[in-house]
Amino acid sequence: MAAPKKGRRSPGGQGRPGRVLAFILIAMVALVGGMFASGQTTPRLGIDLAGGTSFTLKAMNEPGQPNAINTTNMNTAAGIIERRVNGLGVTESEVQTQGREHIIVNIPKGTNAKQAREQVGTTAKLTFRPVLFAAPAGKLPEPSPSASAGADKDKSGKGDKGDKSKAKDGEKDKKGKPSGTPTASAPGASATPSASRTQGRAVTEALKAPQAPKPPSPNPSGNATDDLQKQFAALDCSTPEARSKAAQKSKDVGPETNVVVCDKDGQEKLLLGPVAVQGVDVTDAKAALDTQQGGGWQVQLKFNGSGSKKFADITGKLAAKPEPQNRFAIVMDGQAVSAPSVRSAIPGGSAEISGSFDQSSADDLANILSYGALPLSFDVVTETTVSAALGGDQLRAGLIAGAIGLALVVIYLVVYYRGLALVALASLAASAVLTYTIMVLLGKAIGFALNLPAVCGAIVAIGITADSFIVYFERIRDEIREGRTLRPAVERGWPRARRTILVSDFVSFLAAAVLFIVTVGKVQGFAFTLGLTTLLDVVVVFFFTKPLMTILARRKFFANGHPWSGLDPKRLGAKPPLRASRRRPSAPVDPKEA
């Protein structure tokens, strides 16, 4: 019989266990290094462990829709609010309905609470309105005969005071206002921010111009009524309190009526025409880098069929108008979140809003456009800070229980498997390092937060991982009982142990995947952790435990069956090694012929 070629792998074995072991150790070092490089060395904690903020939203009846508060609309609103909060990078938030007209939103600590409240509390319907007039945020002078005379004096050139006043107003406006507004354009079109600020005195003179009083017109170019003129002049958007009061007042205005609003930053106030496009017509919005115009950030949005037609119509009309009437305002909760100018009609259902965006502001606007169209209006009735004291006590108790269980497992392994317990403990340590570092990195990458059920999943995973080692050890011991030495026992026992481990882990992972899909909230944390640790169990057994066992089988302590190795043939009741019989089979003897 020909001898096997040198270096050939045995069935079910590993030709170079040292390389496999080095690979998994390098991967562990890389993960630990990535964890420290990310600047976060502890897992992100959920609201039950770290505390956070809880909001209670109350649904409000829409004008003319007394039956709008129902189970369907409440569930739809809860889903939109959850996606809106998750748009901030929060994946451990809890959004659930409570009773007939309330929604509870819990956001874990570490999230920008102010930004989250703005996203959660911004629950009015999203609309697109044409801009009729724009002015600085402060109050404007009331029209009066003396003011008119003064204006005439300035026009006639007899007074230098007016010129100086105009210059001062202009300087003030330049100093306090940004020099440009975002610009809306079709994808691929050239767009640059355009100046659209009107000086305070010019606005006053425009408002004093004689206008025939008439009801608000659905035509975007219609003039404001006298009441709107006074309201626009008196509106002060320079303080958060004034903006909040103005937003509450403008929310009650119908879609066919002109309205006066503040922008969300308090930089200007806007006189807007009737609603041209509803927020429900927006199908998608996302922030992206503008690769054609210097690499700045922009917001790309898409409309459905009816929204595409309406948006093309209104942008075609606005593009033919002068500043600032060539702008449309994106209104949310009674405030203008953006008011880009239009260069040309935008057909096709796609548009790009570009301007002085950074990544954060572009993400915020895209998030509002994506998830802003709620079927109901809500008010934030309570906002409370959730303490982590109870969760911390439960976590401490859970960790103590886990430590006791782990200690019992270690004692059992040492007593029953003796030297093999070192292999099991090293494998458990490798699994713990991988699990911890991946959880930390996932918290940074996808916002994974560790809650109490997730901790329970990690504790349960200790038993799953230890079970895999025991299956392999018992296969090796069975081979030794059959009279084989350790090295062939390690290789022959691996294929059968491998099948058992894979089947067991597949069932565990399938249960975790089903649990993750069909459940919500904290139970998903348990399922996610259980699935993650199950996958890591396969990685550790294949790339750490098996090659480590192959290497140790070459050491005399284990290969010779030392009584403390856990592989003593006498203690295991091994059969004596079988030897090949040298006796030849008897053959019939033919009588010799004479």
Image (spheres, rainbow, N blue to C red):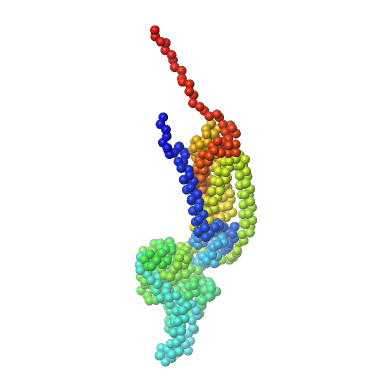
Outermost residue toward the bottom in this view: 158
Report x, y in % for residue 382.
59, 65
- Relative to 36, say whether 1 is above or below: above
Location of residue 41 by image quarter: bottom right
Quarter of the image that includes the C terminus: top left
Q: Residue at x 58, y 41 (%)?
A: 419
At horizontal 54% and vertical 38% (from top left) the residue drawn is 556
Which residue corresponds to the image point at 38% horizontal and 67% vertical from the top-left?
294
Q: Quadrant of the N terminus?
A: top left
Residue at far top of view: 594
Left or right, residue 373 beside residue 47? left
Q: How many marks?
A: 0
In terms of depth relative to the viewer, which is nearer, 313 or 560?
A: 560
Q: Quadrant of residue 187?
A: bottom left
Q: Residue at x 49, y 57 (%)?
A: 445
- Whether residue 594 is visible, yes or no, is yes
